[in-house]
Amino acid sequence: MDIVQTGFAADTGQPPKYESLGLATLLREATAGHDLTSLGELLIEHTQRYDDPYALLELSVVLELKYQRPAALAVQALAIQTCKHYRLKSARSTRSPVKVLALKAPGDLMANTPFECLLENADLQIEVLYVGRQPLQDVSLPEHDVILVAACASDENAEVLARIATLISHSDRRVLNRPERIAHTTRDAAFALLGKVPSIRMAHTVRLPRERVLEAASGAFDLSDVVDGRYPFIVRPVGSHAGQGLVKVSDRHDLAHYLEGTDAQEYYLAPFFDYSDPDGLFRKYRIVMIEGTPFLCHMGISSEWMVHYPYAEMVAHPERRAEEARLMANFDSDFAVRHSNALQTIAELTGLDYVGFDCAETSDGHLLIFEIATAMVVHDMDDPNIFPYKLPQMRRVFDAFNDMLCRASAAPVNATDDGSTNHEI
């Protein structure tokens, strides 16, 4: 596929409309190492000539994938200022297609559930409405059969989630991932929700201002007074993802050195759990819950405690890929059974229709949860020649997500958990 030309229609003498490639396609190209510069240049040229918010929105994704976040957010803001409602996908079947309305927050790729990767091949009509700071009386919900709240939990999205709560109260359709439940997936709120569950282990995560962390680094107070544990601690800036700014500090001098290299104003701190197995390797799992059913998305195996996926170690070690393949094949009858109590509790306490979490297993058989969120990237973009077992597993995930939307679209009213009609939050 020539990605540069795919989105541009042939010259018809009329102002051309850019046909968006979409997040999933752009992520796949970037993951494969393909340079998106040429596409970005054509999009810039196109938007300079034509008023096309779809092209602007696509350009913002290209810029972010090229690590130009400030420019990406500026272009996205211009697109949303021009148009807040987008049709991302039309159904292939024209007879009564299921109309999915996703409510998004402005922001980078971590601001919303990346549902585009889950629904890349789904036969659905997908509408997106960006909910920002505009007066709510100026916002109307596009026609829809089911609503998916895509905005995730963050400081930046707190006001957006509150505004979404007001908007969805005017819909009589089923709402998936209600905003008041999404709010419980921040790192500190997740510990408050799940940290005391007997079958679950979570590091006691606290949120501290920079001034307080500096005091801990100087020895003015002991971090164990506010965190259940002692050094080593894990520290990261509030709002960071994918391991950015995440370090393990062994003492207050390490902490002081860390603070010299970051200017964040708030941090999350938690005690470090050594979750290495007897072979010295660390195994981290990404699991999603869809209507209470767990699905394994990947397992990363590393000699380092900070496990990312995909990464060079999994490519370099075929025996680790073979282990991941076995886990995927036996997940429903093995891992999911051993941790059934923990998994059921996560589904019940979060109350979310779709949620993901990164976890490990402790030596005493508990589920160790690192993070829980609705914005985790779940995809099928790993090289099928190296990871041939991944695609069938991810198709199960995608099918389950699609089936959830279709079932929800058939619900006649926006129902609460007890089945009663709910028009207010």
Image (cartoon, rainbow, N blue to C red):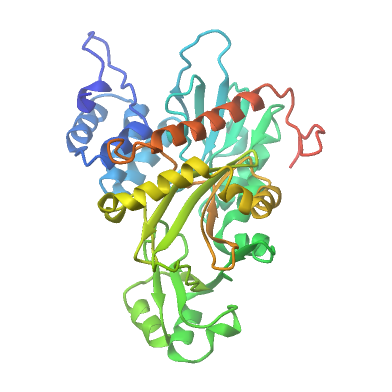
Q: Residue drawn 68% across and 49% down?
A: 344
| Residue 261, x across and y down, in percent | 31, 74
Q: In the rendered image of this protein, does residue 328 appear above or below residue 51?
A: below
Q: In the rendered image of this protein, does residue 104 appear above or below residue 21?
A: below
268 or 377, which is in the foreground? 377
The quadrant of the rendering that contains the C terminus is top right
| Residue 199, x across and y down, in percent | 66, 61
Residue 297 seen by the camera: no
Q: Across the whole image, how many numbered discs are drawn on residues? A: 0
The quadrant of the rendering that contains the N terminus is top left
Q: Residue drawn 49% across and 10% down?
A: 93
Q: Residue drawn 59% across and 44% down?
A: 333
337 or 373, which is in the foreground? 337
337 or 295, which is in the foreground? 337
| Residue 86, x across and y down, in percent | 46, 27
Residue 134 seen by the camera: yes
Q: In the rendered image of this protein, does residue 184 appear above or below residue 188?
A: above
State left or right for residue 246 relative to residue 334. Answer: left
